[in-house]
Amino acid sequence: MKYVDEFRDPQRAKSLIAEIRATATKKWVLMDVCGGQTHSLLRHGIEQELSEHIELIHGPGCPVCVTPAEAIDFAIRLSHRPDTILTSFGDMLRVPGTSDSLLNARTQGGSVKTVYSPIDAVQLAKQQPNQQIVFFAVGFETTVPATALAVLQAAELNLANFSLLVSHVRVQPAMEAILRSPDNRVEAFLGAGHVCTVAGFDSYSDLTSEFQIPIAITGFEPTDLLEGILNCVVQLEAGTFDVHNAYARTAAQQGNLQALEIMDRVYEVTDRPWRGLGTINDGGYVLRNEWCHVDAEEKFADAAIVSTPLPILQDGGDCRAADVLSGRLRPHECSEFGTRCRPDSPLGAPMVSSEGACAAYFRFSPPPRVKTVTSSVETGTL
């Protein structure tokens, strides 16, 4: 196991930046898939350093941001049931549904409890047998094994008062949907390393072949990202398209087989609505029939989560989150960025979530009157 410092080496980062600049003969458009990558690219000044050679756009890589508003509405309704406690990760609480958030629901008497893992929700169900405990299961392949384990543990404990409101999504189908969109500009992807650590990246070969587009799997440290960017640029300049693993210390081609086996016991692939992107074929997970008794949508079947069709849908009102999530608009290009839309008064989910692209731009590349950006590459403080 290597340590973090070597992946933040300023000299190595400067060398990679110089190599990228020397290799690129035109300004290539790369999309980072994960919100963690977006934050790191901005935090370390990488986007700024490469702005003349690479256009970095940011994909729908924040699971909280792509959770449908209708799912949040359903969660809010569950929180107001007298016998139910809705549990969730803290990030979900401030994200608005169609008209309200779980945080507001709590202030209005809804029973909403923040937990740090789905196992905490199982323990709560064990401690409070007279309450129905619902865990709001969101996230990419990275969080699916943990919620699957929670289902298995609840079964071992014979807990009849535990259930999941499932809104898990899969990354690769969303990447494919973006590539198929008529105004797609993505020329290469930085694949999310943590997702590939669980799910592997074997199937990315089909994507690179069909769309003739390079994909580099990267981590979240500066040299991880720069090595991935350099590989994409080298491939684009050479006219090749392949999958490159720049996160080999964690991600393996076949993924985590034990985690995948647990996921497969509990979930199956299904079409899923993504906020801003509509329903994506095979874009998410649903509980298998044998686990329908822990499916909150069936257990409390008073509302369906509405599916919406592609193409790109707006988030409602003045928010252009859908364009941001699909890489059609960079956050600071939105007329509302930093004015009407700020973290303390967000118009949409990407400004609320800690992994949201708009939140990343506001924190690390805010409007000039708020703060002046200083590149950590130039200052050697990577």
Image (cartoon, rainbow, N blue to C red):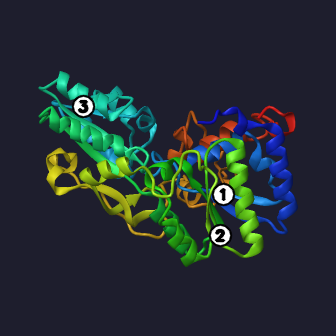
Image quadrant holding the C terminus, namely: top right
What label sits on residue 57 in the rendered view? Answer: 1
- Give 317 or 132, whichever is nearer the viewer: 132
Q: Which SS class for mark 3?
A: helix
Image quadrant holding the N terminus, namely: top right
What residue does disc 2 label? 185
Residue type, label 3: Val
Q: How many numbered marks does the figure carry?
A: 3
Residue type, label 1: Ile
Q: Residue at x 36, y 32 (%)?
A: 117
The alpha-carbon separation of the residues under discs 2 and 3 comes to 44 Å
Q: Residue at x 84, y 45 (%)?
A: 14
**Residue 203 horizontal side relative to residue 56, left or right:** left
Residue type, label 2: Arg
The alpha-carbon separation of the residues under discs 3 and 1 comes to 39 Å
What label sits on residue 122 in the rendered view? Answer: 3
